[in-house]
Structure formats: structure tokens, C-alpha cells
Amino acid sequence: MGEAAIRAARAAGYFNAGTVEFLASNDGSFYFLEMNTRLQVEHPVTELVTGLDLVRLQIEIAAGARLPFTQDQIQLRGAAIECRLYAEDPANNFFPSPGRIEQLAEPAGPGVRLDSGVYAGWNVPLDYDPMLAKLIVWHDTRDLAIARMLRALGEYRIIGIESNLALFRAILNEPAFRAGDLHTGYLDQLLRDHPIREEAPPELAAVAALAARPKPEGRPAAQASSRWLSENRKDLFR
């Protein structure tokens, strides 16, 4: 497959970073899908398993430099997994979820890379791609990488908008994914058999339980208020 990608680039006279995609069948055959004349969003996976800075290499080649290595000098080590965090609702046909990020907690630690530009208080707009961040992990084996990714996803909190965090947790815990039994209809099958629902963080559940407690007799009930409701009203009347 790699040799076919190189032949395609040479036939087109293409010179720089690029990505050739194929579809593979169970009998070992593979079929050309498309070529992107740029780095893919998933390029951090390649960077983590090769130790190469693909963005820098791309810029240096465009400036006229030559690659400082040959193909046989590239060594792959370990396994990497990337999750692309989106402001969307998998339970509602991946409908976009713009709005204000009220609270944000991001994972960190050895073998964890987060490419992100969002922050608590930022408004996710309707006008552009709803990607929030790329979470990438590396470990010695695929099983260990899955475990590390699940730990990182467990530390991630995005409150105020919907996201696909719960979907990634479901995928990484699913037996077929862990066994590598994947196909082009895998996601549709997963969503059909296991509807995705994001669980509220424990701290939110505690706040909700406290708010639901009956008011002591003799005190006037406070007017119900919601920060999300007030922010939505402000956006509505801008």
C-alpha cells in the first residue's frame, strides 16, 4: 500500500507532504480512495510513532530542503490513538452544539498530547468546523494505548455544550474495537446497538441533588435561575 501511494505521487509529479487513502478488504486487496495534498488532521499519530515533526518537515520541503532521512531509516515504535473532540451531539445524529463552554478540564500526563485552542468562557460558533481539540496518546502497545486514552478521556470535562466524549468512551470500551474487528459500517452499528448518552460528572450530580432538596418551610422560594439560560438569552438578543 505504501509503494502504491509513492507511485501515485510520482505519477502526479507531487513533491511535498501528502496523504493517500485506501479502502482495504478482508482478502488483502486495497482500493484507492483519495489523495490529500497536505497533512491530515490525524498526523500527530504518525508523529508519535515515528518521532518526526511532520509540520516542520513540510515547511522545510516547501522552502527547497531535502528530506534528511530515507524510508528505511524510519522506525515505528509503540502505538498511538487520536480522538477528535467535536462540539456535536452523537445521540442526535451528530447535530452541532454551538454555545459557551462554561467549564473545561483537560487531561495531561506522560504519553498524552492535546492540541487545543479552546478555553472556559469561549463561545463555539456556528460558522466553522466544530472541532474543539485533538487528544492523542502513545504507549508501548495498542492495549496500553487504549487504557491510557480511556484514562485521559475520564479526566476530560466539557460543560455547557454537547460533545462526543461519551462516544469515544463507548468505542474504546467496545469489544469489537478492542479486537480490531472494524469495517465501514462499524459506527452505524455501534450507535444502533448502544445508544450514546453522556453521563453527568459527579460534581454536577451533587449540585443537582442539592438543588432538588425541598426548601425549609417559612422561607420564600428563590427564583429559579440558570447560567446557561441567561447566556442563551444574551446571545438571542444581541
Image (spheres, rainbow, N blue to C red):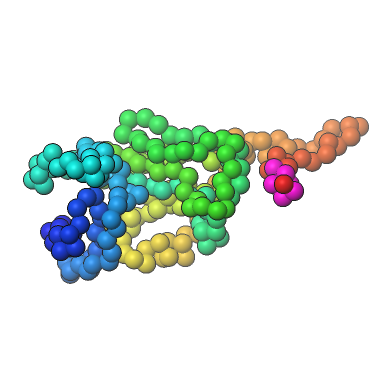
Q: Does residue 88 appear anywhere in the picture?
A: yes
| Residue 202 appears in view | no
Residue at left 30%, top 50%?
39
**Residue at horizontal 19 percent and vertical 53 percent from the top:** 15
Location of residue 68 in the rendering, given as x and y in whole percent from the top left corner: 13, 39
Q: Quadrant of residue 29?
A: bottom left
**Nearest the camera: 20 or 106?**
20
Seen in the picture, residue 46 relative to 25 is either above or below; the reply is above
- Dominant secondary structure of the residues highlighted in magenta in the image: helix
Residue range in magenta is 231-237
Residue 40 lies left or right of residue 163; in this view the side is left
Position in image of residue 97 (x %, y %): 57, 52
Instruction: Tell me which residue sits at (56%, 35%) in the image.
Output: 120
Q: Quadrant of residue 89?
A: bottom right
Residue in view at x 73 percent, y 37 percent: 211
The part of the image, by quadrant, that contains residue 149 is top left
- In depth, the one of 167 and 136 nearer the eye is 136
Which residue extends farthest front? Answer: 64
